[in-house]
Amino acid sequence: MAAVLKNPGIKRFSDNVAKFWFAMGPFRYLVAAGLMILVPVIMERGYLPEWTLLGYLDGLYGTNILFTTGVWILLALGLNVVVGMAGLLDLGYVAFLMLGAYTTALFTESGSAEQFHFAILNPWLALPIALVVAMLAGVLLGVPTLRLRGDYLAIVTLGFHEIVRQTMNNLEVTNGSRGIFGIPHPSVPVTGELGLDGTPYWQWLLVPAIILAVIMIKHLENSRVGRYWTALREDEVAAAAMGVPVTKMKVLAFVIGASTSGVAGWIYAVKLNYISPNNFPLLQSILVLCAVVIGGLGSIAGAVLGAALVIMLPEIVREASGGAEVFGFDIETGRIAVFGVLLIIVMIFRPGGLLAAKRRRVELMEAGAADMVISEAGPDPDETAAPVGQEPVVTEGDDVRAPSEGGEER
Amino acid sequence: MDCNTGLLGPTFVQGLLLGFIYALIALGYTMVYGVLKLINFAHDAVFMIGGVAAFYVIGQWFGLTDPFTGVGLILVLVAVLVIGGLASSGGAVLLERAAYRPLRKRHAARLSYLISAIGASFFATYLFQQSFLLGPGKRSFPHVMTTEKAFEIFGSRVNNKGVLIIVTVIVCLVLLDRLINQTKTGRSIRALSEDVVAAQLMGVNVTRVIVMTFAIGGFFGGIASALYSLQFGNVVWNMGFIPGVKAFTAAVLGGIGNIRGAMLGGLLLGLIENMSVVCLGNQWSDVVAFVVLPLMLILRPTGILGERIGG
């Protein structure tokens, strides 16, 4: 496993792909959008061979998996801002998705005749409302938790997920555990095979949202705000001493993070037409975090890859196994167990994630020295041979900076 | 608000019992945190293994499913608890070996441990979901003990299982307190949680102490699991998740890394959660538990008793 990842041929190939990709400049967003619209159509028709692995996900089943993947890419992008960039460990991130989805339901013509609505609006008008509600929830969560450090924040945010979920489950206005059905589709200008009647319909909602989110986060990352977040993540006290507006930046991270999942919630609600508290178990919040960390903290491409892996990999394992059993272990029902093992393996061999952010790579290398106290004594044979994460770091533009001293939080 | 004061007694008793169990599970979280400064996210799986092992050994292998009395009852109960404890302890040691040590060798970042622990937890729980182990449904725990009223307090009954829980947990807590404060192992655990470098310089074998910490925390988790299964009468592959989250909350509430804090936090959380039923009804108890936590943390950002192990 490690040997494969460190293979110079593979590394050169991936470097070249990256170089070609970034050489396209802003056009790469258009290319990405085109791919994200085309590939699912090809997959749906079953044109992809099975050795591509994506070929297993064909037909309506594959389309639904891809839809979930798209929603999760949005979620991972948002959580990446909170955890990867600002360093605030959020274990209840799906709460914002829930709020976005429920807001959409309560502002459109949904449910039975007795269903409570704040207003009955066009589904498109519900989008900004869902966005604002999710962002306000970000403020609501951010402000009281400002004083809390890493692990305390984790449990409070985890509780936040449960609070929101149970509230939706208990309130009359949200129709309790029965959920709300009949949330209307928004109309899109494309009709026919590729529009409302066809299966790729959801792409007209998801693809622009994903591209816009990527552009927004990319710009924030390279702006003063992004550097404030980095400083905050590395050392809060030092950052405050240097004049970083800690309070504002923490709340902003929560708000920006919440915004993508508010949109994701809207898309989720209008695509599926039905939401209930049971669609949002606590496990999902944990899985989004897994997606972000596997992909590579702070890396936008990593967040996309991580979300795709977390959703598609178990399904591909299910399809590819074809009901096979190993020593009585049924791979299809046990795919989450397989996924768990993969999580451990990725963390052992790529502790910074599959596509670790460049800045992070420098930091992880240094973190090793700082965190040595907790590690085993004596030289590690693997470490001396080919240290993980010690690839030469190419810095571009304003990325040039001295490796940080602090390493991970605390 | 209309409060049903008649429920005060029963909810108090129920809260106390659940609180004792939470306290025992919270010890596992807090001890690992004290030594490694990491949340052990796989403790829910460790917890589950204990109950399931007791179910297997007592119910399936020995086929003891009828109620016992007298000395036989005491023997079989001790067996249930010890089997649960040892199995969880073994599980915790395996967990440390598979998901923590390789990362420690590689100086991984803190979040990497979190994810590998989550991976280990997924692996263990979904492995037991497989039909050749436990299967996807609930299995009833061997009925080794009849439920009888033991005594009455505040006008509510406490049955013999409740007495068992209270006695076992108190014995465990006293044992642990002595272990931490009076033995050599306990001293090394305290040393490690205080200052890793200094402990290493004084000749503490870090890896051994970490394994011991996982083993001890797992042991108490397993006992809690056996008690929990006895109380509720069944085992299921995902039984660890809810008690795990609650116990973790309890550990933070009391001050994570602090053993007495875990006990206090567990009891408080169990009582608050169950007694909220009196005024708010059944469905809001989880919300109350999770609202109390941030409120408490705003007042005391490191939990009620702070972050120190031992005490």
Image (cartoon, rainbow, N blue to C red):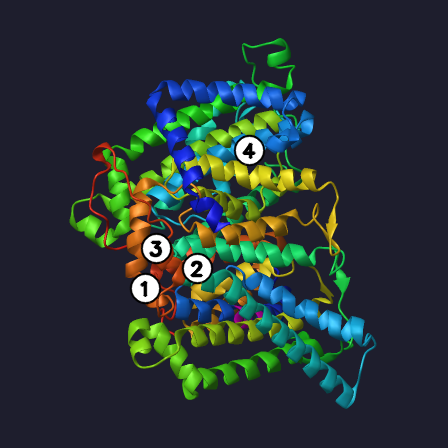
Disc 1 residue type? Met
Q: Dot 1 corresponds to which residue?
A: A372
Q: Nearer the viewer, mark 1 or mark 4?
A: 1
Disc 4 residue type? Thr
Q: Dot 4 corresponds to which residue?
A: A69
Whether discs 1 and 4 lie on one chain: the answer is yes
Q: Is residue A139 visible?
A: no
Q: Residue at x 46, y 66 (%)?
A: B251
Query: Disc 1 to disc 4, how far (Cα)?
Result: 38 Å
Q: Main secondary structure of the magenta part?
A: helix
Chain that bears disc 2: B
Chain that bears disc 4: A
Q: Residue at x 40, y 45 (%)?
A: A141
**Helix, strand or loop under label 2:** helix
Residue A13, image x and y in percent? 42, 33
In-front residue for pair B136/B13: B136
| Rendered view: B157 above or below A72 | below
| Rendered view: A147 above or below A186 | below
Instruction: Based on the picture, tell me whether residue B190 belongs to the magenta stretch.
Output: no
Disc 2 residue type? Leu
Q: Who comes first in sequence, dot 4 or dot 3? A: 4
Span of residues in magenta: B20-25
Chain that bears disc 3: A
Mark 4 is surrounded, within 10 Å at the Cα level, by few (under 14), some (14 to 19) or many (20 or more) other residues, namely: many
In the image, farthest residue toward the bottom: B71
Whether discs 1 and 3 lie on one chain: the answer is yes
| Rendered view: B144 above or below A375 | below
Q: Is residue A256 left or right of residue B141?
A: left
Mark 3 is surrounded, within 10 Å at the Cα level, by few (under 14), some (14 to 19) or many (20 or more) other residues, namely: some
